[in-house]
Amino acid sequence: MKDMIQDTDVLLSVRGLSKFYGARIGCAEVSFDLFPGEVMGIVGESGSGKSTLLNCMAGHLTPDRGEVFFAGRDGGLRDTLRMSEPERRMLGRTDWAFVHQHARDGLRMNVSAGGNVGERLMAVGARHYGAIRDSAVDWLGRVEIAEDRIDDRPTAFSGGMQQRLQIARNLITGPRLVFMDEPTGGLDVSVQARLLDLLRGLVREMGLSAVIVTHDLAVVRLLADRLMVMKDGHVVESGLTDQVLDDPQHGYTQLLVSSVLQV
Amino acid sequence: MTDYNFAYLDEQTKRMIRRAILKGLAVPGYQVPFASREMPMPYGWGTGGVQVSAAVMTPEDRFKVIDQGSDDTTNAVSIRRFFERTADVAVTEETQEATVIQTRHRIPETPLEAGQILVYQVPIPEPLRFLEPSEVETRKMHSLEEYGLMHVKLYEDISQHGAIATAYAYPVMVQDRYVMDPSPIPKFDNPKLHSPAIQLFGAGREQRIYAVPPFTKVVSLDFEDFPFEASKAAGACALCGADNSYLDEVIMDDAGHRMFVCSDTDFCTTRRAQGHVGAEGVPS
Ligand SMILES: [Zn+2]
């Protein structure tokens, strides 16, 4: 199996990933490849296993079976599930980023916006205050947060601002892969639209590689190159986003697209 | 007095504490858990330091206690009396004479020497606690040397105050490995953490012991553009004229007359005995 994927330029290769909660299936036999600069959308209702899958890939949950290969900067594929915890945590604050649905899960609420955005830089050894602050100002600007809010705590921010702050905090170190869990969930519709627009700009501008889990088809329509549709822990359909959404083959996808199942 | 073992604690407990101390000395800056005992004084009165002092004390020792630099606060007096009663140990106020010194909030001005033991009373041993409340997570951060968070704290200081405002319990990196809270000593004392003496830290309520062996490398954390400064109030001691000791501002009378004097009373007394006189001092 390793031979199959070794001579490609794949960034992330998921093979037979499965997670069970007792007799209940979390996710089962999920396999896919992600290439650099590509955005993979994973859609499904709540309970479909999409969040379980995301957390297994990102190392937050331990799957029962399968492999998650990630291409290191030297090009070699490494099984992230079997690397040591220090290595995986290092990956988590350098090459990987994770955007949580609830911004407060991904932010330090008792630390200023600048401190939140600068933390990953300091975690990898940045020791020049002025340079850290300049980067923080730059990144706040990129997510449309005014520079004069840099010393405010996230508790003083609106939900949409908190989410944009979380995105800046994650992207500042130029991660090569971003996991996003319902990044627009829980926000007002107008706020969602603005955030989505911002994310689309960042994805294009930075050539981000990302795996985005959502129940919102508008999110994947705008951001994802490819799509996987999940139901009861299984991938029931996958393909190019426009293809899947405009010409769904599986009955479940047809229901999703016709909005019958929209949550 | 005959109700107690030497220095109050039974020998088995002392052995347990000594093992923690030895482990601490073997892994400088690492917080060693220990089973803290009930002591006949409330937490916050230095029960961690008292247990460490009891475990290292021998009948031949000369014991000194300092509280905020002073030998005669209620806290210092009660701890000194405790060991006079339970260990019948000799006591002294002179830093140079002491073999075991228990301290809260200061390192003596007089340089310590090989053979001396400095025992710190520690309220909160975990330097990462203020930003990461989870004990499981802070332990993991120590074991993996994930210390970026310490600089987030310093970053916050600078962004709020224009400088690193942390004045006490200023975090240090010990022997290029563990970040350590030096207890609430003023950062002026941080350079003295590199010392020929043995330094032991005891936290009673939090049940932790840690140590800095003689001549261990101890570096105060900082930024390249905001380097660490061992600062103190400007000026000289009003009583002895010393301009290189840590000063406390004291109110002298009901009229609110203030002056700066050495926080280390033994240091100040010794200097005055040697004939040094400050601006408001009188020759002794
Ligand atoms: Zn003086």
Image: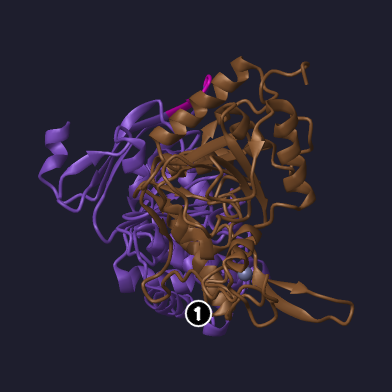
Chain colours: A purple, B brown
Residue drawn at 44 percent across, 47 percent down? B113
User: Is any part of residue B29 visible from this angle?
Assistant: yes
Mark 1: is the Cβ under 8 angstroms from ligand 1?
no
Position of residue B165 relative to residue A12, above or below, is below
Q: Quadrant of the C terminus of chain B?
A: bottom right
Vertical placement of B273 versus A99: above or below? below
Looking at the picture, how far across and down is residue B167, in whole percent?
58, 66
Query: Is residue A27 found inside the magenta-colored segment of the image?
Result: no
Label 1 residue SS: loop
* Residue for point 88% across, 82% down: B255
Residue most extreme to the right: B254
How many C-alpha atoms fall within 10 Å of the one at disc 1: few (<14), some, or many (≥20)? Answer: some
Q: How many marks?
A: 1
Relative side of B75 to B162, left or right: right
Chain bearing mark 1: A
Residue A260 location, x and y as percent?
59, 50
Residue A111 in sight from this viewpoint: no
| Residue B210 horizontal/vertical position (percent) | 51, 39
| Residue type, numbered disc 1 | Glu
Position of residue B14 relative to residue A114, above or below, is above
Numbered range of the magenta stretch: A19-23
Taken as a whole, is the magenta stretch helix, strand or loop?
A: strand
Front position in the image: A213 or B237: B237
Point out residue A139 in the picture as x, y percentages from the top left corner. 43, 75
Judged left or right of residue A90, residue A232 is right
The residue at 33%/60% (across/down) is: A175
Placement of A117 over or under B113, stated as above or below:
below
Q: In this rendered view, identify the residue nearer to me: A207 or A249.
A: A207
Q: Which of the 4 image quarters holds residue B148?
A: bottom left
On the image, numbered disc 1 is attached to which residue?
A: A144
Residue drawn 53% across and 19% down? A23
